[in-house]
Image (cartoon, rainbow, N blue to C red):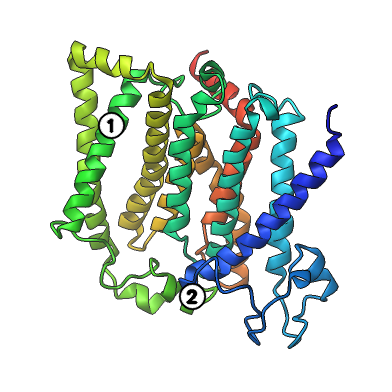
Amino acid sequence: MAVPDWIWFVFIFAFGCCIGSFLNVVAYRLPRDQSLVKPPSACPACGRHIRFYDNIPLISWLLLGAKCRYCKAPISPRYFVIELLTGLVFTALFTVYFRTNLRTGIPSFLDGGWFIYLISLILSAALIAASAIDLQLWVIPVSICWFVTIVGLIGSTLGCYIIDPALIRGYALLPSTSTFLFKEATIASLAIGAAIGLVISWILLATGLIKRSYESENINHSSEQAFEASSEPPSANHESQINHRLEMSKEIIFLLPIIICSLAAFYIARKNPTIHTWWLNLTQYPAIAGLLGSLWGYFIGCGIVWITRILGTLGFGKEAMGLGDVHLMGAVGAVVGPTPVVVAFFIAPFLGLGWAGLRMFVKKSRQIPYGPFLSLAVFTVMIFHDRIFNRLIGLFYQ
């Protein structure tokens, strides 16, 4: 007997609110380098442990009147908002994937659609947590980004064992080397070459042959300093002491092995028929195609933000976008693939215009935490995925 829709919606919304409660823990503890598991939740003001009946998502905040039961210290509305937002996002994605025609090709929930939905939930939860931290502390923890990246790589590799690979490729349910712009062998060579270059850059960094940017100042990259800065961006006095263009040259040097190895692998695969055939045969294995497609999505997501960061900093003499944004979009690319992450990147500025204008008039500052708007753009692409892809295909194949 089919389960009524209202039971699905109630369960998913409640589950989302519970995950939102955990995301509140992540948003508070992760920037402070505290364990996410222990000790149990406690009031930041009086230190008293929060009882289970005072920790029920949404309900407890309302019943307590947004105050601690013991010391009456105010409880931030952020806790309620994140729980509610997570529940609504989880429910919205379930509706879009399984109860509307906005996303086609996804199998029914029990026939494998749960796998696509689960990966989308993990990405959504991570984006909500990262956005909450970025809004308050102007920093995006790299650990969140790496976690999502690993989920994307593993999910894209294993997806073919749960869902028909033809569906995955035909409807772009997961990243793959098969795209409407590039051939499979092209994506494979670029991805593997970039991966080799990244390993070389890491080795050079670890041995001290190349230097980290902002290594001495650690501005904008230290969670501790971000915590101390509270809700404000770094001060102008601190910024004026840093040669940002010099710091960007360090990042360019780090990227050179990635770019060179990627182009070299592409050239070799293109000029050598034997290697080209080998690349092509390699991508015929769905698991390999998924892994390399996810890996290429990661590099595209990182690359498009990193290029913007470098060019903006060189042009204006101030740090344009943070490395957290680079890692965040790399993680998104590993989950959704190269094309959706590029589309999301170009949607994000339009979503941030209103916030930027408000800050200019209210706080006389043009700086904005960009992570929340990148996240909102990713949600938009996830929901309108098919319409965006159809428009792009029509644009390139008219």
Q: CA distance from mark 1 to mark 2?
A: 38 Å
What residue sits right under mark 2 in the picture?
A: 227
Which of 62/160 is in front?
160
Residue 46 appears left or right of 365: right
Residue 168 appears left or right of 324: right
Answer with the quarter of the image where residue 157 lies: top left
Disc on res. 96: none
Q: Earlier in the sequence, mark 1 or mark 2?
A: 1
At 26% across and 12% down in the image, what residue appears? 277
Q: Residue 126's spot in the image, x, y percent?
A: 55, 52
Q: Residue 366's spot in the image, x, y percent?
A: 51, 64
Q: Residue 260's spot in the image, x, y percent?
A: 20, 36
At 82% across and 46% down in the image, what residue appears? 10
- Residue 240 can be seen, yes or no: yes
- Residue 377 can be seen, yes or no: no
Given the image, on which type of amino acid does mark 1 rest? Answer: Ile
Image quarter hosting the N terminus: top right
Marks 2 and 1: in contact by CB < 8 Å?
A: no
Which element is circle 2 on? Answer: helix
What residue sits right under mark 1 in the picture?
A: 192
Given the image, on which type of amino acid does mark 2 rest? Answer: Phe
Which element is circle 1 on? Answer: helix
Count of numbered circles on the image: 2
Number of residues whose C-alpha sits closer than 10 Å to that of mark 1, classed few (under 14), some (14–19) or many (20 or more):
some
Q: Residue 299's spot in the image, x, y percent?
A: 36, 39
